[in-house]
Structure formats: structure tokens, C-alpha cells
Image (tube, coloured by chain):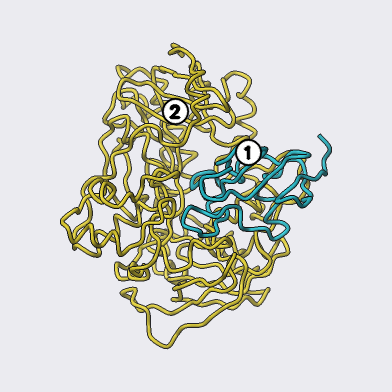
């Protein structure tokens, strides 16, 4: 949104391709206007959301906003292939900004495919966007700040939270007082969420993780167990909790497939989103005319994404000949905001680090690739056969070949390869068109290449 | 569109509000299983944002339709998808 606003301000013709029905992305997700009900997020976050959406609404008449559309392929020649309902189209813009955001990371465990086991952000999206409680009795687990936020929001919406299990206490961030000071407005919101959870008397299990889920047609209970600092389950610490919703989040993974498909040079850093397009300070990838902004360029949160969007939107709208010095001077304000919040994000990152042994929660008979029902034991035999790259594992056991295109399982498989072989895969699974299923009807009705 | 209406899930009426997705309306009444996959595993909504495709089901006879991304509409006919069938 911020990038589009800036590009319009600089006189560009802008098309926004939005997977959602309304602008806002994941953090500033909007409910349908017909749905009454209140926000359960902190008022300060709601204010930031409305401020940005209002700025976007102000320019939406000057740009081509495509709601419910998605880019299913991006090529090195600059072509973007777009599906919108039952039709497809090819665009060829002068510059493309990928603001693809992140998805959630899960560590698979036995029973995690049962209906009722969701991503924590997914449960939050159901609440935020549809004003519906995704469960009547929830266990929320994982690491980082999101489980706490989701627990508080479910409680505020009238839900019941049976347990909040967090791998590492968020209190660990207190060791970085300067970072906390820089992010004080977010820290204040965090304390308020914690107060909601405390007042509700939710049992908190610090250092605990879900080790298995139980149920027939759907989730009935989850077993939590404590893990030590290396991530190994401590014997004798298991406790079973009855629930119909288990919301998990072990951090985030960048939606990097389009950047990689377009040929951009990629890097991997699991702490900030896994595989990411390598970008400079203005969001330029290694492909001329292809930019990346926000969490899809590096996991840094909504506040940085907004500042980053302004910076990258300006760079994409400006001829390269203008020079970075001029841009830096013009964008001093956004650049300073981005730097200030980054200090805080460094403290948040500490809470998202996953100890390697934690991946042993994935037992041999755990389904890792949900689409193709590939269990870890099958992946291990491929590894034993010397197939150590994600592409080779895929070719042998079909992991990552299903409906989701590997979005859910590939980050887990990369970490499991590292655990099993001692070295992380050096390349991501080659993303092929289409990044998402598109109907033949849509492809048959594909429009001509437009010079947008 | 009326603000409150019903659609059908597995032959039973489900009430929904305008703007809710099929998945949300079903979660609201505790219906979590939207599909039985090819291996016989029950599956439901996971990511809530259209990325994982686990909540795909049959909507108005069209298989593999994501319940989390499809707005509920009056009179819609939603069925659990069994394997590759609609």
C-alpha cells in the first residue's frame, strides 16, 4: 500500500494486484463492511491500520486496484501473469514491486493434520476478517510475540484459552533495553495483551511445545511437553489438554517464489524469513526493474514494511539515472523510521530463533508434506539415498508437489535436511509456474500482453 | 444480499452473515472437517489466508474450492470433498 501511494504521488500509472478482497494485507486485514463487530487488536494498532488504509483509499481512484487477483508467474523479461476469477492476463510493467509478505512456519508433529490445528495467524485472520471465533476452547503455542497476541485477541472476542505455550519467554527481550526503548509503542501494546491473558487466568507454559495432537474426525486434545535449551523434549513433562483449536506459530517464511521465478538472486536467513530476494537499501533485486518491499524482502514487521514501501515505491518510480544520493536525501524521514524500528526488530528476532533439536518433534511417521501425505520417514530414506537438495527430495518422494506448491512444507524440509545431514540446502526448490492452481478456463481466456 | 442468510453444508442449513467466508461460517458452528483427503485423513482450514489449500471443498458442484477464500452466499451448496471427487 505504501509503495503504491508513493508511486502514484510521483506520477506513475500504478496497478495493484491484491490476493485479498480488501486492502490491508495480513496485519491490517479488514473485515467486510457489512460485518458488524469490533476490533480486538490494541487501539494504537487499529489507528495505524486506519491511517494507512485511509491514505490508500485517497489514491485508489488514481490507480488500478485488482482485488482478489493473484500473480501466478513472474519471468525475467518482466512479464507478470495474473489470475483474476475465471480469467487470466499478462502485464508487462516498467517496474514491479513484490510486496508478497510472509506466511507462517510450523514444526510438524503427529496429529497436526487434524481439522482444528491451525496457524495462529490463520485463527486470527478468521477472527479479524469474519468476526468468528475459530474454536471454543483453544490451546495456543509456538514462539515469538504472535501466540500471545492471538491468545489475547481470542479472549477479548469472548473465546476460551485453555493454555498458552511459548517456547521462550518474551521477557528475554528485556536484555536489550535500548531496542525495547526504540520500539516502545509496540512494547506497550505487548504489555496490554499480556495483561489481558493474565487477567483471564490463562495457564501459561513457558518452554513447552505441542508434541502430538489427538482426535478422530477433528482435534480433541493436544499433548504439550517441556523442551530443554537445545530443543530436546524433557521426559516426564507431558500434559494433555482438551481443546478444539490448536493455534501454532513458529515464526514466518517469506513468500519468495515470484522473486526466485523471475530470476532474482536469493539468500537464506531463517531468522528473517528463510529464502529472500537479495535487495539493496532501495529494494532493488538483482533483476533490473524488479523490486521487493516489506516482510517479503526481510521479516521486519508492519511498521518497517510501511516505511520500506515508501522508500521502495519512490525508487521504483524514479529513473535509475537520478542517483541514490538524491533519493536518500528526499526519503530521509522514511529511512530514519525504518532504521529506528529495525533496532526493536532485532530484539524480537531473539524470541523467534528455533533450536535445531526442536525439529526432532517431527517423528518418522509424521506427515511433513500435507498435500501429498509424505511422512518424514520417506524423506529420510531419500536423504539416505544421497538426495540432499530440495529438488532431489521432491523428485523422489513428491514433497512440495501438491496444491500449496510447497509453501507449507518446504521450510520444514529445509530444516529437517539440515538436522539429518548436518548442512542446510544451498538452493531453494526451483519455483515453476504456476505458483498457485489456476483453472484451464482462466488460462484459456488469457488476455494479450498489455503495456501497462 | 440479505445480511443474514443460510447455505447448505452436507445437506444441513448453516447460517452466515454477509462478508463471511464459507470456512468462517462453518467454524462458527464447529464444523471443522471440510474434506477427506485421498489417504482418508480428515482436513480443515489451516492458514486461513488462501495459501495452504487444505480447506478446499465442493461449492455449488465445483471441487477444490477454497472455503477460506470463498464468500458465503445465500443458497450455496457446500459439500465435504472426498479425495479427488467433487
- Mark number, residue A102: none
Shade representing chain B: cyan
Q: Is residue A266 above or below residue A349?
A: above
User: Looking at the image, can residue A334 be seen?
Assistant: no
Mark 1 chain: A
- In the picture of the structure, the residue carrying the numbered disc 2 is A313
Q: Nearer the viewer, residue A72 or A141?
A: A72
* SS category of the residue bearing label 1: helix
Image-based side of A45 in relation to A399, left or right: right
- In the picture of the structure, the residue carrying the numbered disc 1 is A51
Spatial CA distance of label 2 from label 1 is 18 Å
Q: Position of residue A339 (x, y in %)?
A: 39, 45
Q: Is residue A192 above or below residue A319?
A: below
Q: Residue at x 33, y 70 (%)?
A: A360
Q: Is residue A296 above or below residue A188?
A: above
Q: Is residue B15 above or below residue A448?
A: below
Q: Position of residue A189 (x, y in %)?
A: 59, 59
Q: Residue at x 51, y 45 (%)?
A: B84
Q: Nearer the viewer, residue A412 or A103?
A: A412
* Chain that the image shows in yellow: A
Number of other residues with Cα within 10 Å of mark 2, as a class: few under 14, some 14 to 19, many 20 or more: many
Q: Position of residue A337 (x, y in %)?
A: 45, 42
Q: Residue at x 40, y 33 (%)?
A: A434
User: Looking at the image, can residue A265 be seen?
Assistant: yes
- The part of the image, by quadrant, that contains residue A417 is bottom left
Amino acid at each position: 500500500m505504501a509503495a503504491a501511494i508513493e508511486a502514484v504521488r510521483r506520477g506513475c500509472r500504478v496497478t495493484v494486484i491484491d490476493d485479498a478482497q480488501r486492502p490491508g494485507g495480513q496485519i491490517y486485514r479488514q473485515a467486510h463492511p457489512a460485518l458488524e463487530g469490533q476490533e480486538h487488536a490494541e487501539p494504537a494498532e487499529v489507528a495505524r491500520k486506519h491511517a494507512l488504509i485511509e491514505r490508500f483509499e485517497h489514491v485508489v481512484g488514481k490507480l488500478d486496484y485488482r482485488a482478489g487477483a493473484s500473480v501466478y508467474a513472474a519471468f525475467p523479461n518482466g512479464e507478470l501473469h495474473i489470475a483474476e476469477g475465471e480469467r487470466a492476463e499478462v502485464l508487462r510493467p516498467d517496474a514491479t514491486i513484490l510486496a508478497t509478505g510472509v506466511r507462517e512456519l510450523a514444526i510438524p508433529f503427529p496429529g497436526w493434520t487434524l481439522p482444528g490445528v491451525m496457524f495462529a495467524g490463520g485463527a486470527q485472520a478468521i477472527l479479524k476478517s469474519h468476526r468468528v471465533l475459530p474454536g471454543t476452547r483453544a490451546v495456543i503455542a509456538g514462539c515469538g510475540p504472535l501466540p500471545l497476541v492471538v491468545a489475547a485477541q481470542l479472549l477479548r472476542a469472548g473465546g476460551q484459552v485453555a493454555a498458552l505455550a511459548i517456547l521462550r519467554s518474551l521477557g528475554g527481550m528485556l536484555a536489550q533495553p535500548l531496542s525495547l526503548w526504540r520500539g516502545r509503542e509496540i512494547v506497550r501494546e505487548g504489555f496490554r495483551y499480556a495483561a489481558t491473558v493474565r487477567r483471564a487466568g490463562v495457564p501459561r507454559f513457558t518452554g513447552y511445545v505441542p508434541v502430538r495432537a489427538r482426535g478422530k474426525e477433528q482435534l480433541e486434545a493436544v499433548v504439550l511437553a517441556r523442551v530443554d535449551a537445545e530443543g530436546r523434549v524433557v521426559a516426564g513433562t507431558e500434559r494433555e489438554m482438551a481443546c478444539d483449536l490448536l493455534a501454532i506459530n513458529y515464526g514466518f517464511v517469506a513468500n519468495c517464489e515470484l522473486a526466485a521465478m523471475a530470476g532474482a538472486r536469493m539468500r537464506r536467513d531463517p531468522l528473517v524469513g528463510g529464502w529472500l530476494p537479495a535487495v539493496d537499501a532501495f529494494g532493488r533485486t538483482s533483476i533490473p526493474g524488479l523490486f521487493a518491499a516489506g516482510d517479503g524482502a526481510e521479516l521486519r514487521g508492519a511498521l518497517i514494511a510501511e516505511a520500506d514501501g515508501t522508500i521502495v515505491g519512490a525508487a521504483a518510480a524514479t529513473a535509475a539515472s537520478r542517483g541514490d544520493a538524491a533519493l536518500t536525501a528526499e526519503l530521509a524521514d522514511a529511512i530514519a523510521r525504518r532504521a529506528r524500528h529495525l533496532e526493536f526488530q532485532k530484539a524480537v528476532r531473539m524470541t523467534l530463533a528455533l533450536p535445531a533439536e526442536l525439529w526432532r518433534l517431527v517423528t518418522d511417521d509424521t506427515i511433513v508434506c500435507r498435500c501429498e501425505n509424505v511422512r518424514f520417514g520417506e524423506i529420510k530414506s531419500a536423504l539416505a539415498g544421497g538426495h540432499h537438495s530440495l529438488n532431489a527430495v521432491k523428485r523422489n518422494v513428491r514433497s512440495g508437489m501438491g496444491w500449496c506448491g510447497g509453501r507449507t512444507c518446504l521450510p520444514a524440509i529445509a530444516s529437517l535436511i539440515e538436522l539429518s545431514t548436518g548442512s542446510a540446502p544451498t538452493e531453494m526448490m526451483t519455483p515453476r509456474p504456476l505458483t498457485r492452481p489456476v483453472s484451464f478456463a482462466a488460462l484459456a481466456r488469457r488476455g494479450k500482453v498489455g503495456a501497462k | 444480499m440479505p445480511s443474514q442468510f443460510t447455505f447448505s453444508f452436507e445437506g444441513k442449513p448453516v447460517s452466515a452473515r454477509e462478508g463471511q467466508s464459507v470456512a468462517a461460517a462453518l467454524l462458527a458452528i464447529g464444523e471443522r472437517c471440510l474434506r477427506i483427503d485421498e489417504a482418508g485423513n480428515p482436513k480443515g482450514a489451516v492458514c486461513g489466508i488462501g495459501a495452504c489449500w487444505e480447506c478446499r471443498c465442493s461449492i455449488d458442484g465445483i471441487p477444490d474450492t477454497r472455503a477460506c477464500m470463498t464468500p458465503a452466499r445465500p443458497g450455496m451448496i457446500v459439500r465435504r470433498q472426498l479425495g479427488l471427487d467433487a
